[in-house]
Image (cartoon, grey):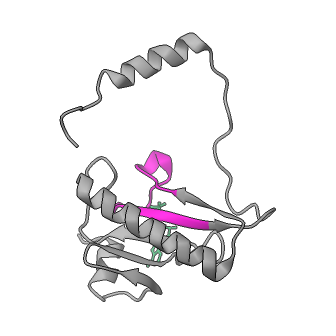
Amino acid sequence: MASVFSRIIRGELPAAKVYEDDLTLAFLDINPASPGHTLVICKEEYPGLIELPADLIAAVAQTTQRVAKAIQTALHPDGFNIVQNNGAAAGQVVFHYHVHIIPRWEGDRAISYWRPGTSDPETLQVTAAQINAHIDKETP
Ligand code: AMP
């Protein structure tokens, strides 16, 4: 079944569109964490970052920067968060790759993030090596 975002692309559902090009679409989140909270999506439907081809990652990243610059000029936030959830455990609700641009103002408490944990140097090195062993150096 087509995602809610694919239905927006097809014009079956309304959206407050901010920007569109051949590969990407940006529109306002229907439940904004802050004014101007924008979603940037890849028009082709892929569930998340793992599945998305590299050229489409680049296209979404480019649109994200383009829209963030416009938000900066239009709304004058003090900063913004870029959020991209992958998997239900990470809070993903719509399984169609998208990036959140969340404008932030000093003291707005719009979103809270992770609680910083503790580490020891040895564990960090072991985990880094574990991940590094699986880096695919062939795929761009
Ligand atoms: P995520 O948790 O990263 O999957 O985020 C999905 C986001 O999509 C949420 O912030 C929703 O508010 C937003 N959303 C869901 N349906 C719509 C819609 N029809 N128009 C705009 N935003 C939507």
Tell me, yes or no, whether the highlighted magenta stretch contains residue 9.
Answer: no
Q: Which image quarter holds the N terminus?
A: bottom left
Point out the image quarter for the C terminus: top left
Taking 119 as reference, is 72 above or below it?
A: below
Q: Is residue 82 above or below residue 10?
A: above
Q: What span is in magenta?
A: 83-102
Q: Is residue 36 visible?
A: no
**Residue at x 53% of width, y 14% of height:** 123
* Left or right, residue 80 beside residue 124: right
Q: Is residue 93 left or right of residue 108?
A: left
Left or right of residue 127: residue 71: right
Q: Position of residue 52 (x, y in %)?
A: 26, 54
Is 4 placed above or below 136 here?
A: below
User: Toward the viewer: 46 or 93?
Assistant: 46
Q: Residue furthest left?
A: 138
Q: Residue at x 44, y 60 (%)?
A: 93
Place of residue 23 in the rendered image (x, y in percent of width and height, measured from the top left): 26, 72
Q: Position of residue 15 (x, y in %)?
A: 43, 86
Q: Residue at x 66, y 72 (%)?
A: 34
Q: Is residue 52 above or below residue 67?
A: above
Occupied quadrant, residue 127? top left
28, 72: nearer the viewer:
72
Answer whether residue 90 is magenta in the image.
Answer: yes
| Residue at (33% x, 54% y) in the render | 48
Q: Is residue 138 visible?
A: yes
